[in-house]
Image: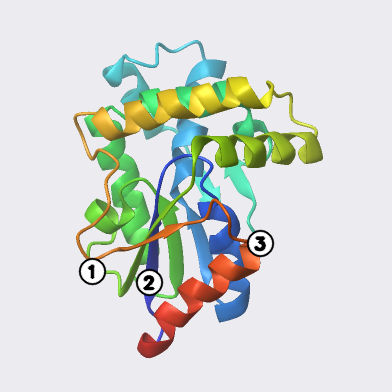
Amino acid sequence: MKINIAIDGPSAAGKSTIAKQLCQKLGYVHLDTGAMYRCTARKALDCGIDLNDEDAVCEMLKNTVIELTPDGKVFLDGKDVSLAIRTDDTSMAASTVSKLQRVREDLVARQQEMAKAGGFIMDGRDIGTVVLKDAQVKIYMTASPEARAKRRYDQNIKQGIPTSDIATIAEEIRQRDWQDMHREHSPLRKADDAVEIDTSDMTIAEVTEAIYQLAVPFL
């Protein structure tokens, strides 16, 4: 039987990296919901749309196609934006548009439709609490702002993405954490039945194995 696994947590906690590793181990498909909000923000920025104008952003979404492929690529209206949506300005913009209720409703509906068949690992801010309330395994993944900033900095350097220094990224992460936890609609929080994992001092392999062992009883 193929189950669904929900991984929630703050920005740069390693959710997508771990989800991809788990997908390889289980033969599942990764649905990076954060990428969908990043795509929305990136297109709004490129189109000069006010990120706080809910009507305008929702109207834009009506004519927006977001595709997440099994090999981890992200396509926005047919264009590969896998790297373009990982910039620091897109990250902060994504936090802004994710506060809009009707934007969330649109993207959540898309996410739920994608996951109906099972066999998906979905990560984001409200997967266990809103999107996949019935997921058999729920994880709340966190890490210190400093650890997350170092990972984001290293990732940006490796991928050739323009980046701020670690201290600046850490402050941006703290700001985004506050925004995500205090937004009116679907704030970031740990689901009551989720297992919390602090990855600050854990390797990718250690986190992957820990979640795999939690999933084993359901496989």
Instruction: Estimate the x, y position of residue 134 in percent, counting from the top left.
Output: 23, 69
**38 sits left or right of 55 in the view:** right
Colouring method of the image = rainbow
Q: Residue drawn 55% across and 28% down?
A: 170
Cβ–Cβ below 8 Å for labels 1 and 2? yes
Residue 71: give its label.
Answer: 3
**What's the CA distance linking mark 3 and mark 2?**
18 Å
Where disc 1 sits, the SS reads loop
- Residue type indicated by callout 2: Asn
Question: Would you call the spot at circle 1 few (<14 residues within 10 Å), some (14-19), or many (20 or more)?
Answer: some
Relative to 137, residue 45 above or below: above
Quadrant (top left, top right, bottom left, bottom right) of the N terminus:
bottom left
Question: Would you call the spot at circle 2 few (<14 residues within 10 Å), some (14-19), or many (20 or more)?
Answer: many
Mark 3 / mark 1, whichever is N-terminal = 3
Q: Residue drawn 64% across and 51% down?
A: 73
Quadrant (top left, top right, bottom left, bottom right) of the C terminus:
bottom left
Q: Quadrant of residue 218?
A: bottom left
- Residue type indicated by callout 1: Asp
Instruction: Estimate the x, y position of residue 80 in percent, counting from the top left.
Output: 67, 41
Relative to 110, residue 160 above or below: above
Question: Would you call the spot at circle 3 few (<14 residues within 10 Å), some (14-19), or many (20 or more)?
Answer: few
**What's the CA distance linking mark 3 and mark 1?**
25 Å
Asked if residue 143 can be seen in this view, the reply is: yes
- Residue type indicated by callout 3: Asp
Q: Residue drawn 34% across and 43% down?
A: 107
**What's the CA distance linking mark 1 and mark 2?**
8 Å
Instruction: Estimate the x, y position of residue 46 in percent, counting from the top left.
Output: 57, 17
Q: Which residue is mark 2?
A: 4
Asked if residue 41 can be seen in this view, the reply is: no
**113 sits left or right of 41 in the view:** left
Q: Which residue is mark 1?
A: 134
